[in-house]
Image (spheres, helix red, strand yellow):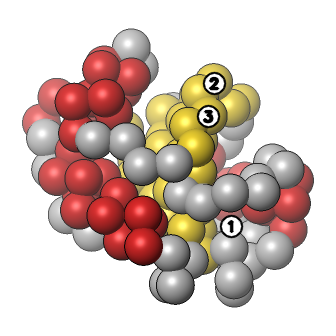
Amino acid sequence: MALTALQDANFEEKTKSGVSITDFWAEWCGPCKMQTPVLEALSDDAAFSGIDFYKVDVEENKQIPADFGIRAIPTLIVMKDGQAVERLTGFHNKEQLSEILQKYA
């Protein structure tokens, strides 16, 4: 399953309830390109069917990354009912992310 792209305008609405993970990325970022297939694989895993998987292009959307103080990408933020509960910077493999997401699944 592909990650759903969010913009500054709809980020709050989409992440205000339930559990989500958002990948803050850019097209020119090598590690971001490695992170996307990992997130797509996890989004297809039935164990995480209750988690929404999103991405925000930091080049096209400036407000939300600024609000979170994102200075390096990829940065992954796990949200639960509108609150950031985990923040990960840099590439994370499937096993690492699976372990983190299991706490919220």
Which residue is labeled 1 in the image? 10
Between tags 1 and 3, which lies in front?
A: 3
What is the number of the mark on residue 87?
A: 3
- Residue at image coords 84%, 50%: 69
What is the number of the mark on residue 39?
A: none
- Residue at image coords 50%, 75%: 29
Position above or below: 13 against 31 = above
Q: Secondary structure at mark 3?
A: strand
Image position, residue 59 (x, y; %): 69, 83
Q: Are marks 2 and 3 in contact (CB under 8 Å)?
A: no
Which residue is labeled 2 in the image? 85
Alpha carbon separation for disc pair 1 and 3: 20 Å
Q: Amino acid at mark 3?
A: Arg
Between tags 1 and 2, which lies in front?
A: 2
Alpha carbon separation for disc pair 2 and 3: 7 Å
- Residue at image coords 76%, 54%: 70
**Left or right of residue 38: residue 46:** left
